[in-house]
Image (tube, rainbow, N blue to C red):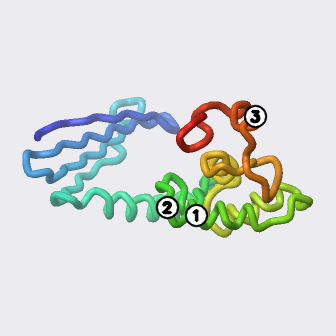
Amino acid sequence: MTFTMEYTSTARDTTYTLTVTADADGALEIDLRGDDPAGSTVAEGTLALPPGGATEAARLLHQSLTAIAAFEGRRVRRSVGNANQRWTADADATLREAWLAHDPATPAVEVIRALATAHQRSPAAIRARLPRLGCDPDVTGRLLTESTASLLGRDAVAGGP
């Protein structure tokens, strides 16, 4: 399948255009061009990738450009290790067991922060995942009751009520 995508963004009066073209075999050609307000080209380059090379190249470019942005003094948002990764059955089981092992007297926010660090996820991701595992995110060590599950919504618990 052949396709072309184009993205445009403007920063500091420079308009950047990124054009990605894929051939029938899946090889990619990525062209970057930056033009100033007068129309002069201030940035340009082409990257050719073999089929299947986009993921590793994207990771490498992200790491490199993040490091360069740090030199420019720009604040770079850091993502948590497993952010945007699917939850595995093992990770779900480990999270559920860890939540239920804590004393209900322990503040939920403390346990959620600790579990977030352990699972390399954000506290929001842990809090959102707990009801899907049948755990009450507001009370450490407690399972959801039927009434609390209904308050969280039918999709909050696996299988839904």
Q: Is residue 14 left or right of residue 129?
A: left
Give the residue number, with chain letter if any, for mark 2.
89
At label 2, counting other C-alpha atoms closer than 10 Å, the crowd grade (few under 14, some 14-19, many 20 or more) is: few
Residue 89 horizontal/vertical position (percent): 49, 61
User: Who's the residue at 87% across and 58% down the image?
Assistant: 104
Q: Is residue 7 left or right of residue 113?
A: left
Residue type at the position of mark 2: Ala
Of labels 1 and 3, earlier in sequence is 1
Q: CA separation, marks 1 and 2? A: 6 Å
Above or below 52: residue 38:
above
Q: Which quadrant holds the N terminus? A: top left
Q: Residue at the left extreme? A: 24
Q: Is residue 11 left or right of residue 148?
A: left
Give the residue number, with chain letter if any, for mark 1.
93
Asked whether the beta carbons under mark 1 and mark 2 sit within 8 Å of each other, the answer is: yes
Asked whether the beta carbons under mark 3 and mark 2 sit within 8 Å of each other, the answer is: no
Residue nearest the viewer, comparing 83 with 64 = 83
Q: CA separation, marks 1 and 3? A: 23 Å
User: Who's the residue at 59% across and 60% down the image?
Assistant: 80
Residue 71 visible from this viewpoint: no
